[in-house]
Amino acid sequence: MAPPSDGAIPYLTDHSRGVAAIVSADDAWYWAPGWQAAEAEADADFRDGRSRRFDSMDDLFAGSDAIRGGTSA
């Protein structure tokens, strides 16, 4: 089932109160509790300044290597 063309998420309701959202099976992983916990952690890291911007992928890999103490393959 394709999402509505306006991007709205359909909901199952009980007396006009939304009780469940209908999402594509391909997107269900995003709503798993573990993934949502990781999203919340990432949001907190970004909000609290625990993030870094890189100018290029090479800079990203070099920064990752520096943290891990290795080199990119």
Image (cartoon, rainbow, N blue to C red):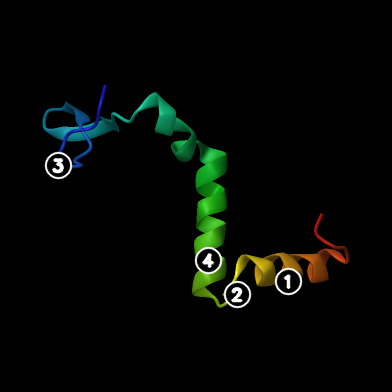
The x and y percentages for residue 15 are: 12, 28
**Nearer to the camera, 51 or 54:** 54
- Badge 1 crowding class, 10 Å Cα cut-off, few under 14, some 14 to 19, many 20 or more, is some
Q: How far apart are marks 4 and 1 (CA)?
A: 21 Å
The x and y percentages for residue 60 are: 66, 68
The amino acid type of the residue labelled 3 equals Asp
Q: Distance between the residues labelled 1 and 3?
A: 40 Å
Q: Residue 44 carries which label?
A: 4
Q: Identify residue for label 2.
A: 52
Callout 1–callout 2 Cβ contact below 8 Å: yes
Relative side of 1 to 47, left or right: left
Q: Identify residue for label 1.
A: 63
- N-terminal label among 4 and 1: 4
Q: Mark 2 against mark 4, which lies toward the viewer?
A: 2
Tag count: 4
The amino acid type of the residue labelled 2 equals Arg
- N-terminal label among 1 and 3: 3
The x and y percentages for residue 16 are: 11, 32
Q: Identify residue for label 3.
A: 6
Q: Mark 1 against mark 3, which lies toward the viewer?
A: 1
- Residue furthest to the right: 69
- N-terminal label among 2 and 4: 4
